[in-house]
């Protein structure tokens, strides 16, 4: 491993000022499941590694009826996967969490790390985007809240500015008759990255789609909301033709690349198939809810 | 055999418990506290001249004890089959990952920092990364001086980058194809695949005051590795002792010297113990693994399914150095599969490229030609409207047939395996769900004629003063239970309990020579020599008992730890008493040697010269479900019928077959080393996707026992064949399920989707 100075702040204020001071030379560690691998492989050579573990108040889930869910940045993926509150109110997040790596990885990996890594194929963003989540960011000039769909700028790039840290993720309360699904396509049934990930959350009213959000993973430089597909669905009852058109619309918005995990052509086509399937399943679940 | 025979008993291998509990000591666990840590500087380029190298800064770094380069080694070439390698690159590098220098330092961080301080000036030269371009006239040469490499047994190419080439033919293919009712032609491709052992390569070397080196390595070929290290470093064998440590997976990774010459060199330079453990990334660029291959095949048959002709071409990309199989002919002959084919013309080529070197991976060179022929036979059967098992039965190789390499196969159990699959499929019935189907494919292994020499294997059996025994063998246990099985053989011959046999194994100074634990040869070959050694010990015991009991040896029996008179069983003596009495006896302490019965064995082998004694045939059936939209393939059920000659320990046999199928599933569905201009793009176990527990279907099997002549109690090899037909079985099942033929391995979802679009 490369040599670096290890920083272990004990308050959020201290963490922010250290990140501010060493901006550009510091890597922030939440769970470390990605960071440590890259340090060991010498892919990154930061001068400082700042571990957030001792910063109080960044860990844990709180749910309040009517206000929604707050997920601290250091909350582990395993906590999200197994939380009864998440399973009941935001099952798509629990579903997606359960598909990330292995149990051992999920015990260490955090939602903050998963978001701030800004990997296009990350497991958590599609579900969070589909629930309309926001990011609470704390920085040298105070704090701000950013809709999650403005959080990602590119692979490895977020809207965090000098000294900023992601403190928590806020997921709003879902309206009645809301349900969703996360579908992950990967060559291996477990322990794999998504070749395409699709989350869909649908709210029904009188059998019609009152609102819906779709989010795609691994098919663009950032997790993506195919808004044209969402617009097609809004205000309509679901029929096979509409499902197909929504899939087609999502496919047209996807901008995948070819890499070792899959070809651009295949990914594009799968966006169509999986969006159609996700919308269908979300509708069915919402009907049954 | 006696009533209490151990043959055919599923004795639990003694190391199973420790492994399950994580108590087994592997190489790193044995590292001395004061060991230096070694790291290797590797080439970042696929092909480049080394213009200048400066290690002085690295040498000056505090904590660095030694830095070595090609200048520190004798100017010799070595290699597994052809001597094309040096320890470090000399004038040029031929692949990404080729060792250029190595350091030994007080800790890992210092060693890594030292690597950063070595400056190498490269001049990149054009690389050649696929065998077709490499074979073209005027292609950049990977080895300019190939003609000087010894030994010449493998080097039969000579033209440009072609290392080896062969043609095997019989009959008149042109004429035969013209007479066929159906002719099918297809090209197939398969990628480089990796062993992916849990334990990466690691070795420790230490030098004592007299200059003698002890090397601890998790190799399965202790003697071959010792020979290579001694050749590469100019050491007499008496100065190097290699002790094999527990292996965390082999699958072909541990049959040749990989890091051992570097570790020994650094230990000699520093006079300190030196340890080297490869990173997972280095496993993908610093070791050698399964060759990508290109197969072109044409098969012709009569209306009734009789195969008339096969024309084929098998082109192998051996990478920058040839660590792979030395015999091209039998591999090329695999293109006709386990069938009677009167007319064939087969060409094989092994070609150097600037890819990472290719070497052995479980069932080296067998799965790909079998993928091709078994896919195409299936297509012919489909064209003829014939049941695929029926088609194979009609053409199955039989006892006494001459196979394409010119040998006569004996003890053939192929038809029985096909019948077992037929019966199983009948019992299972056709899947009723949509997009589900069974596919079948056959496989073969050990289609080599009996060697002119004897088995390159030997053993001793000592009988202790209490009647227990020690087996001294060169066999390394790669985790499949080889040691358990060898002990079982000794216990059987001496009629003592299994746990009364202990082992000293795989130590080049202490144990006799052993070729390697590989190629499904250990039970078949080493098992036979262990049996000879145990029988010699038994003869010595009988002879001593005869003196003491005053009963002719021929009238004595041995059972339950006693030698007794067959006429009057109460006249007996225990092995313990014999062991104790032997110490001061005329014959001396009981020490059975496999050399004692060897002449007789070799005489029998000479009579069988040119025949194939222990050919292994198998047939697999896979039931899959295909998602026709995403192309995802789920293997629902799996069935294997394999001829094992005789299952000496059925549980170990079953475990080997299950493991082989799982290994094959990886190659069939997800595993491929992604290479681009000589660079490996997925040098990690996230993107190099091996099967996980959820990928594995229930695996059922039927063992066929068609005994061999020279294996112990008729046993044949087991471990390699179950990997061979998996790709074809699944490809054929995909075709039967959704009508799509995928001709490139692995059978990934995007290839299935593509094949669905190309459906006629």
Image (cartoon, rainbow, N blue to C red):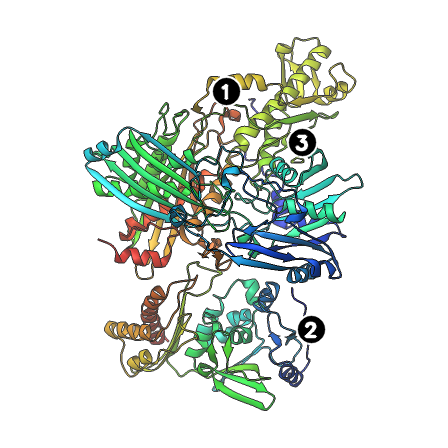
Distance between the alpha carbons at the discs numbered 2 and 3: 51 Å
Which secondary structure, mark 2? strand
Q: Quadrant of residue B468?
A: top right
Q: Which mark is residue B622?
A: none
Question: Can residue B571 be seen in this snapshot?
Answer: no
Share a chain, discs 3 and 1?
Answer: yes
- Residue A252 placed where, x, y %? 31, 74
**Left or right side of B209 for A10:** left
- Dot 3 falls on a residue whose secondary structure is loop
Relative to B463, does residue A83 appear above or below in the rendering?
Answer: below
Identified at 26% across, 39% down, the residue is B387
Can marks 2 and 3 be said to lie on one chain?
Answer: no
Residue that carries the numbered disc 1 in the rendered image: B605
Given the image, what chain letter belongs to the residue carrying mark 2? A
- Which mark sits nearer the N-terminus, 3 or 1? 3
How crowded is the residue under tag 2: few (<14 C-alpha within 10 Å), some, or many (20+)?
few
Q: Quadrant of the N terminus of chain B?
A: top right
The image position of residue B171, as x and y in percent, is 28, 28
Q: Estimate how packed mark 1 is, as few (under 14), some (14 to 19) or many (20 or more) residues with alpha carbons within 10 Å.
A: many
Viewer-proximal residue among A187 and B6: A187
Q: Is residue B456 above or below residue B425?
A: above
**Compared with residue A46, is residue B713 higher up or lower down, i.e. above or below?**
above
Label 3: chain? B
Identify the mark at residue A5; answer none if there is no mark.
2
- Mark 1: which secondary structure? helix
Alpha carbons under labels 3 and 1: distance apart: 25 Å
Specify the farthest residue to the right. Answer: B209
Q: Which residue is more in the foreground, B253 or B236?
A: B236
Residue B520: x %, y % from top left: 50, 35
Instruction: Using the rendered image, report if marks 2 and 1 lie on a common chain.
Output: no
Other-residue count near label 3 (Cα within 10 Å), few / some / many at <14 / 14–19 / ≥20: some
Residue B511 is tagged as 3
């Amino acid at each position: 491993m490369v040599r670096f100075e290890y920083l272990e702040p004990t308050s959020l204020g201290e963490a922010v000022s250290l990140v501010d001071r060493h901006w550009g030379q510091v890597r922030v560690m939440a769970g470390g499941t990605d960071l440590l691998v890259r340090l060991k492989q010498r892919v990154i050579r930061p001068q400082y590694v700042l571990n957030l573990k001792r910063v109080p108040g960044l860990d844990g889930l709180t749910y309040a009826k009517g206000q929604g869910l707050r997920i601290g940045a250091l909350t582990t993926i395993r906590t999200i996967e197994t939380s009864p509150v998440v399973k009941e109110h935001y099952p798509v997040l629990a579903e997606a969490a359960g598909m990330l790596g292995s149990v051992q990885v999920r015990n260490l990996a955090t939602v903050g790390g998963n978001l701030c890594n800004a990997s296009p194929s990350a497991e958590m963003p599609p579900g969070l985007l589909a629930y309309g989540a926001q990011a609470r960011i704390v920085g040298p000039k105070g704090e701000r809240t950013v809709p999650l769909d403005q959080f990602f700028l590119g692979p490895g790039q977020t809207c965090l500015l000098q000294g900023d840290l992601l403190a928590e993720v806020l997921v709003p309360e879902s309206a009645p008759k809301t349900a969703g699904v996360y579908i992950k396509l990967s060559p291996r049934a477990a322990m794999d990255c998504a070749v395409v990930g699709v989350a869909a959350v649908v709210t029904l009213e009188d059998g019609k789609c009152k609102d819906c959000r779709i989010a795609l993973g691994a098919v663009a430089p950032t997790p993506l909301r195919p808004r044209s597909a969402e617009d097609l669905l809004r205000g309509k009852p679901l029929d096979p033709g509409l499902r197909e058109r929504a899939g087609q619309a999502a496919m047209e918005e996807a901008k995948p690349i070819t890499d070792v995990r899959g070809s651009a052509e295949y990914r594009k086509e799968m966006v169509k198939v999986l969006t159609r399937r996700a919308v269908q399943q979300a509708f069915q679940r919402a009907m049954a809810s | 055999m006696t009533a209490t025979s151990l043959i055919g008993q599923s004795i639990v291998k003694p190391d199973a418990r420790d492994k399950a509990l994580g108590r087994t000591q592997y190489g790193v666990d044995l590292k001395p506290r004061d060991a230096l840590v070694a790291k290797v500087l590797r080439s970042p380029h696929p092909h480049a001249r080394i213009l200048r190298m400066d290690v002085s800064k690295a040498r000056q770094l505090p904590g660095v004890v030694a830095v070595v380069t090609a200048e520190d080694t004798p100017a010799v070439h070595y290699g597994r089959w052809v001597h094309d390698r040096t320890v470090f690159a000399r004038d040029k590098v031929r692949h990404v990952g080729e060792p250029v220098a190595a350091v030994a330092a007080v800790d890992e961080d210092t060693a890594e920092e030292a690597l950063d301080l070595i400056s190498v000036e490269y001049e990149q030269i054009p690389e050649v990364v696929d065998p077709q371009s490499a074979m073209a006239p005027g292609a950049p040469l990977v080895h300019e001086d190939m003609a000087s490499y010894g030994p010449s047994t493998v080097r039969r190419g000579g033209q440009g980058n072609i290392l080896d080439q062969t043609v095997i033919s019989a009959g008149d293919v042109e004429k035969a194809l013209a007479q066929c009712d159906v002719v099918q032609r297809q090209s197939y491709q398969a990628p480089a695949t990796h062993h992916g052992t849990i334990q990466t390569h690691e070795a420790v070397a230490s030098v004592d005051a007299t200059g003698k080196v002890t090397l601890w390595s998790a190799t399965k070929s202790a003697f071959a590795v010792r020979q290579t290290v001694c050749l590469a470093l100019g050491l007499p064998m008496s100065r190097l002792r290699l002790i094999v440590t527990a292996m965390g997976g082999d699958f072909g990774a541990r049959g040749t010297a990989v890091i051992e010459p570097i570790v020994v060199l650094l230990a000699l330079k520093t006079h300190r113990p030196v340890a080297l453990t490869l990173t997972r990334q280095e496993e993908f660029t610093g070791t050698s693994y399964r060759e990508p291959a290109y197969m072109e095949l044409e098969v012709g048959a009569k209306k009734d399914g009789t195969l008339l002709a096969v024309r084929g071409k098998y082109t192998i990309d051996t990478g920058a150095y040839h660590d792979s199989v030395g015999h091209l002919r039998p591999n090329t002959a695999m293109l006709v599969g386990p069938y009677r084919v009167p007319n064939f013309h087969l060409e094989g080529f092994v070609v150097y490229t600037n890819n990472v070197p290719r070497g052995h991976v479980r069932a080296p060179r067998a799965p790909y030609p079998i993928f091709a022929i078994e896919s195409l036979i299936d297509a012919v059967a489909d064209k003829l409207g014939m049941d695929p098992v029926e088609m194979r039965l009609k053409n199955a190789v039989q006892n006494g047939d001459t196979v394409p390499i010119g040998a006569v196969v004996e003890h053939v159990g192929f038809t029985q395996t096909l019948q077992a699959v037929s019966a199983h499929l009948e019992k299972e019935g056709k899947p009723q769900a949509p997009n589900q189907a069974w596919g079948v494919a056959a496989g073969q292994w050990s289609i080599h004629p009996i060697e002119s020499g004897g088995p390159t294997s030997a053993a001793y059996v000592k009988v202790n003063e209490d009647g227990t025994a020690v087996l001294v063998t060169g066999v390394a246990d790669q985790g499949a239970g080889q040691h358990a099985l060898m002990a079982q053989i000794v216990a059987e011959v001496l009629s003592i309990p299994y746990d009364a046999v202990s082992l000293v194994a795989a130590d080049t100074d202490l144990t006799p020579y052993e070729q390697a634990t590989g190629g499904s040869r250990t039970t078949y070959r080493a098992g036979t020599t262990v049996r000879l050694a145990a029988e010699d010990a038994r003869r010595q015991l009988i002879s001593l008992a005869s003196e003491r009991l005053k009963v002719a040896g021929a009238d004595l029996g041995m059972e339950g730890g006693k030698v007794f008179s067959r006429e009057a069983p109460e006249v007996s003596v225990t092995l313990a008493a014999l062991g104790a009495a032997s110490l001061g006896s005329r014959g001396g302490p009981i020490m059975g040697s496999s050399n004692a019965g060897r002449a007789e064995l070799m005489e029998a082998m000479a009579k069988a010269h040119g025949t194939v004694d222990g050919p292994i045939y198998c047939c697999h059936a896979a039931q899959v479900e295909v998602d026709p939209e995403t192309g995802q393939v789920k293997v629902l059920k799996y069935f294997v019928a394999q001829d094992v000659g005789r299952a000496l320990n059925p549980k170990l046999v079953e475990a080997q077959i299950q493991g082989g199928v799982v290994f094959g599933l990886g190659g069939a569905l997800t595993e491929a080393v992604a290479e681009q201009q000589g660079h490996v793009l997925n040098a990690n176990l996230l993107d190099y996707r091996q099967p996980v527990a959820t990928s594995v279907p229930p695996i059922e099997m039927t063992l066929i026992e068609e005994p061999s002549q020279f294996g112990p109690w008729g046993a044949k090899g087991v471990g390699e064949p179950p990997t061979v037909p998996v790709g074809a079985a699944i490809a054929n099942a995909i075709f039967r399920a959704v009508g799509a033929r995928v001709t490139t391995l692995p059978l990934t979802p995007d290839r299935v989707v593509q094949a669905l679009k190309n459906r006629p």
